Image: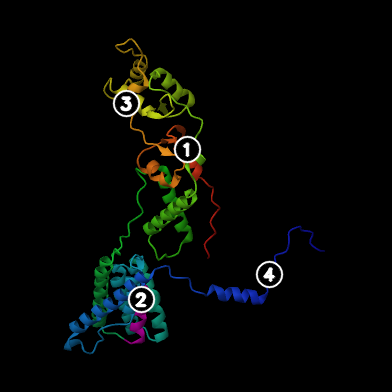
Amino acid sequence: MSSTSSEPAAVREPLPARVLLWLQSLRPGRTRINARERWRIVLGAFLGILLAGALSHLAGGAALDALPWLVAPMGASAVLVFGVPSSPLAQPWSVVGGNTLSALVGMACARWLGPPELAAAVAVGTAIGLMLALRCLHPPGGASALMMVLGGITDPRFVLFPVLLNSVLLAGAGMVWNNATRRPYPHAQRPAPAGAGKPPQVRDAEADLDAVLARYNQVLDVSRDDLQVLLEQVKWQGYQRKLAGVRCADVMSRDLVTVSHSTPLEDAWALLRERRIKALPVVDADFRIVGIVTLADFMRAAELQGQGYQGMDARLRKLLGAVGPSGKPPVVGQIMTRQVRVAGMQRYLVDLLPLFGGSGHHHLPIVGDDGRLVGILTQSDMVAALFESPAPPPEPAP
């Protein structure tokens, strides 16, 4: 009986197209570094191997003529130390511990295991397990273990010289060269920061990153803190791109509630409570801004009449109902902030992100070309301009 399903059958690509797609997957990705960084890596590896080889050769002397003075895995270590100095796999402990411990494992397998095929497999597998356990995973370490087995090396001196000495010298050269060329090395591998004292959104973002890394469950060639910094920079870059063409006039609030210099404080306070807003622009007769009065201004004025925040409600009522020497109630001009930062209608939002993010601003009056108040930009307006629900990211490949 034929299927009555309304869903279309999956269309399978022809075999030549699938072969071509598979071949394209073998194409290496582009290395996203400039010529200067390429030369930095090349020169660093040249100098590192030159230093490690020359000093090891000198240190060997006549007593160690039977032992080589430089081993091949150092070439692979140089790629990591100078090419990716921020990688957890390239740190000094990974270089020294990974190469030396793996060589020790390889020597033991070469001495006590018979068939070379079995010894090679056990040496490499055991070396990887040991490096993982001791937090010194270093890909050339597998080569060090294999080198000992294939070379039939059972002399313990070989682990100290040349493997240990080569590794120490290469890591030392990496410290000098990378720091001299402004690449921090060792690259601090900070533990996951505690969430105490951080905003909820920061703690949530860190928890999300930890959850994704746990689900990914694979060794990454980048540390957690570096990954977090990169993600934050990508997010910031996205904000800048999104806001590149957005101006204040596009998102500002035009429904203005203003007061004048002579508006009684009681009336201004009533407006703040009634409209549920935090600031009132103070304008003159030409609608040019002369100040701003905020909830903080009211709290500060009430605080001046007493010590601490105990009894704040009573002191605030006293402030609003006070009568000055002239017999008139206090006015906005007595407590308003006179130095007011403003922005033009054509100002790009991307220019104002640092102002809202780092200086404590919650509202910014917007003026027209003639200097008159035309709107106000709030944090809510900024968030509304930034907000866009992203699509779920693709699942990582198994």
Quadrant hosting residue 145 = bottom left
Amino acid, disc 3: Arg
Query: Do the residues bearing badges 1 and 4 touch, measured as CB atoms within 8 Å?
Result: no
Q: Nearer the viewer, residue 95 or 363?
A: 363
Query: Do the residues bearing badges 1 and 3 touch, measured as CB atoms within 8 Å?
Result: no
Amino acid, disc 2: Pro
How far separated are the C-alphas under marks 4 and 3? 72 Å
Residue 273 in sight in this render: yes
Residue at the image position 54 percent from the left and 60 percent from the top: 395
Residue at the image position 32 percent from the left and 84 percent from the top: 111
Secondary-structure class at tag 3: helix
Reading the chain from its start, which is encountered first: label 1 or label 4? 4
Name the residue beneath numbered marker 1. 380
How far separated are the C-alphas under marks 2 and 3? 65 Å
Reading the chain from its start, which is encountered first: label 4 or label 3? 4
Amino acid, disc 1: Ser
- Residue 230, relative to residue 375: is it above or below? below
Q: Nearer the viewer, residue 346 or 39?
A: 346
Secondary-structure class at tag 1: helix
Q: Which residues are magenta?
A: 138-152
Q: Nearer the viewer, residue 129 or 198?
A: 198
Name the residue beneath numbered marker 4. 12
Secondary-structure class at tag 4: loop
Rendered-image quadrant of the N terminus: bottom right
